[in-house]
Image: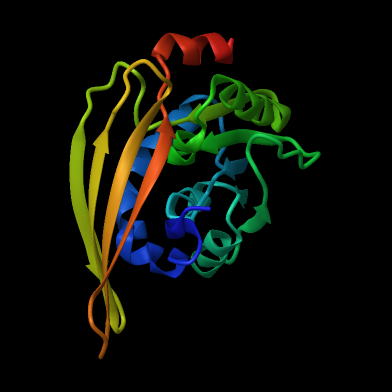
Amino acid sequence: MLKLYNELATWWPLLSSPEDYADEADFFWQLLSGAGLPASGSLLEMGSGGGNNASHLKHHCAHMTLTDFSPRMLEVSRTLNPECEHLEGDMRTLRLGRLFDAVFIHDAIDYITSPDDLRRSMETAFAHCRPGGAALFTPDHVRETSLPLTDHGGHDGDGRALRYLEWTYDPDETDTTYVVEFAYLLREAGQPVRFEHEQHVCGLFPRSWWLQLFS
């Protein structure tokens, strides 16, 4: 499992704070409500991570269930979203035996790197969506999206702070993946600043593949 979602999970709120998600989460709610999700409905988020989207979306739903592959990220989310149900699970194989008014997958879908696993993730969403319900998938990129990109950011917390550099590029345009290099600078009170680096391999599929798999 990637360091960011395992041993560095407690740093997540300093890399990506809930406030950073307010506008995007509002846009997602407009899409879901426009597709028929009632304000009193139920929402399943797969790959919910640290719960930043849920911290905004939960106010629109009567019940929200959050699932993620990483138990440490679920612990971060429980602190932020104690009123939400949290369950560990893989979006490719998850079966809760329940139906929801809508299913949502944010950028966790980026870690699906093969067409077969993408299809399996869509099947999971379908298996949990009531007849007439909605499913929202929001990958960071499709094949037609322009790459490379660079980004940076971070936040100060109580006794510690984080800054990061994010470098996105596609080393092989003939396959179904791209690469994101993350560099983290971590500072804790009374200790030297330390550096961590890791590479995230993410899925990249043409828009037509997405539409074909959905159909």
Give the residue at x 29% y 46%: 181
Q: Is residue 202 shown left or right of residue 6?
A: left
Look at the image and tell me whether residue 41 can be seen. no
- The relative height of residue 78 versus residue 86 in the rendered view (above or below) is below
Of 180 and 43, nearer the camera is: 180
Taking the view exactly as shown, the residue that stands out farthest to the bottom is 190
Question: Residue 139 location, x and y as percent?
Answer: 41, 31
- The relative height of residue 128 versus residue 194 in the rendered view (above or below) is above
Give the residue at x 77% y 42%: 96
Question: Residue 86 location, x and y as percent?
Answer: 64, 57
Question: Residue 183 location, x and y as percent?
Answer: 26, 56
Taking the view exactly as shown, the residue that stands out farthest to the right is 97
Of 28 and 187, nearer the camera is: 187
Location of the C terminus by quadrant is top right
Question: Residue 185 location, x and y as percent?
Answer: 24, 66
Q: How many marks?
A: 0
- The relative height of residue 23 versus residue 71 in the rendered view (above or below) is above
Look at the image and tell me whether residue 108 can be seen. yes
Give the residue at x 61% y 60%: 71
Residue 168 falls in which quadrant of the image? top left
Give the residue at x 60% y 27%: 117
Q: Is residue 63 shown left or right of residue 160?
A: right
Q: Is residue 75 shown left or right of residue 120?
A: left
Of 81 and 30, nearer the camera is: 81
Residue 43 falls in which quadrant of the image? top right
